[in-house]
Image: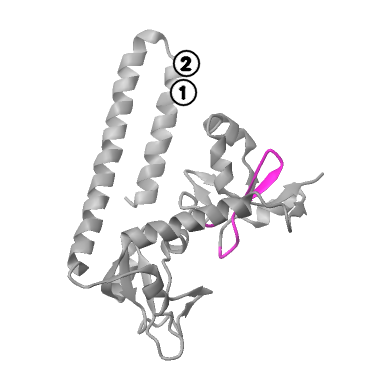
Amino acid sequence: MAKKDFLQQKYCEINQLKNLLQTYPKEYCETIIKVMEKVFDEITEYLDEETSKLKTAVKKVQHQRVFTVDELAKYNGKNGAKSYISVGGIVYDVTGVSKWNGGNHYGVTAGKVLDKEFAQCHGNKLSIMEHAAAVGVLDTNNKREATNNDDKNSEINSNSREGLRYYKIEDISKFDGKNGNLAYVVINGTVYDVTSMRHWIDGSHYGLSAGRDLTEYFETCHKDEKDILKKLRIVGTIIE
């Protein structure tokens, strides 16, 4: 079972058990909690296996070069340079890959860390990268610093009201994250872009779909996690 499908299934199981806790008599609670613990153990075991697979892949290239983000940027496929990208902490040479022409791949450019883009387009199908040679690993400290800077810029942009658009609710259905579309969701009348969020893949998030008003879902599942919205880029508001 694919990682995405497995986690979605377990998410649904946990939600069902949570609902049982709220509706069943107290004498059943202990049994329900034990079942929940089993589900959590299954998730932990699965993620440990995935982590082990990644560590094995990293070991295969650990003797090779360590790239900083700045060094990786030099391999952008331009002016005779090779085309390198980083996915999952591993640096791949995509120079000879047919769909990477001149350092370009459907609007994505080489010389970058493409974890978010890869997850968005290919989920967790790392087998796709078998067509590219692993040439090194990414400097994790350097990557963390770059990610932190991106997160700060993202938060600044998400709170900026410049260039916001007004949408009718029926317009949002076009932004479903499918076939290259952007993925937008509406929460309390505000339109958020979730295209690059790692938990949103191809417009899907644990069984939910982009292009919709998810206020009811958010208020139910994330009512105590309002900070989640600060990580999303605001692109507009809903008008009647």
Q: Quadrant of the C terminus?
A: top right
The foreground one among 141 and 89 is: 141
Q: Position of residue 36 (x, y in %)?
A: 33, 27
| Residue sitting farthest toward the bottom | 80
Task: Name the residue at 36% across, 62% down.
Answer: 142
Q: Is residue 177 above or below residue 47?
A: below
Label 2 crowding class (10 Å Cα cut-off): few <14, some 14-19, many 20+? Answer: few
Task: Name the residue at 29% across, 27% down.
Answer: 37
> Which labelled disc corresponds to residue 177?
none
Q: Position of residue 67 (x, y in %)?
A: 31, 71
Does the segment drawn in magenta span residue 187?
yes
Label 1 crowding class (10 Å Cα cut-off): few <14, some 14-19, many 20+? Answer: few
Q: Is residue 4 visible?
A: yes
Task: Name the residue at 47% across, 59% down.
Answer: 120
Instruction: Tell me the SS state at disc 1.
Output: helix
| Residue sitting farthest toward the right | 240
Task: Name the residue at 49% across, 57% down.
Answer: 149
Q: Which residues are magenta?
A: 179-196
> Which labelled disc corresponds to residue 19?
1
The foreground one among 53 and 177 is: 53
Residue that carries the numbered disc 2 in the rendered image: 23
Horizontal side, residue 174 vs residue 60: left or right: right
Where is residue 126, by image quadrant? bottom left
Q: CA distance from mark 2 to mark 1?
A: 6 Å
**Amino acid type shown at disc 1:** Asn
**Amino acid type shown at disc 2:** Thr
Verify CB contact (< 8 Å) between mark 2 and mark 1: yes
